[in-house]
Amino acid sequence: MPIVLGIGYAMDGFGSYAQLNIDNNKSKDLDDCRGHFDKKRGYHYHVDAAGNNNFINYFSVSLAKN
């Protein structure tokens, strides 16, 4: 299996990879966060399509109260 380089890491420490797999197909088992598990990379994300203005889903912000 060819080595697939990651794009980077999300703030939760999981890797981010291109939208398409090495065979130029989208992963069919992505969860709601655009992530899934495989034996080689463990849990990781695949970025969204260009123009959707996000890399992965479910980033959120919590506001602190004074």
Image: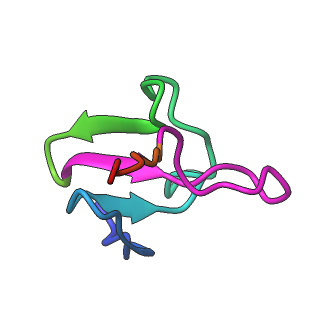
Where on the picture, by quarter, is residue 30?
Answer: top left
How many numbered marks, from 0 up?
Answer: 0
**Residue farthest along the front direction in this orientation:** 66
Of residues 58 and 41, the one nearer the viewer is: 58
Q: What span is colored magenta in the figure?
A: 42-58
Quadrant housing the N terminus = bottom left
- The answer to whether 7 is drawn above or below residue 55 in the figure is below
Q: Position of residue 10 (x, y in %)?
A: 34, 63
Q: Position of residue 40 (x, y in %)?
A: 16, 52
- What secondary structure is the stretch in magenta mostly built from? loop
Q: Position of residue 23 (x, y in %)?
A: 55, 51
Q: Tell whether 17 sits left or right of 47.
A: left
Of residues 35 and 3, the one nearer the viewer is: 35
Q: Tell whether 41 sits left or right of 18.
A: left
Name the residue: 46% across, 44% down: 60
- The answer to whether 60 is drawn above or below residue 5 in the figure is above
Quadrant housing the C terminus = bottom left
- Rendering colour mode: rainbow
Where on the picture, by quarter, is residue 14?
Answer: bottom left
Name the residue: 31% across, 72% down: 3
Name the residue: 50% across, 58% down: 22
Q: Tell whether 31 sits left or right of 3.
A: right
* Magenta-colored stretch includes residue 14: no
Q: Tell whether 3 sits left or right of 34.
A: left
Q: Position of residue 45 (x, y in %)?
A: 40, 49
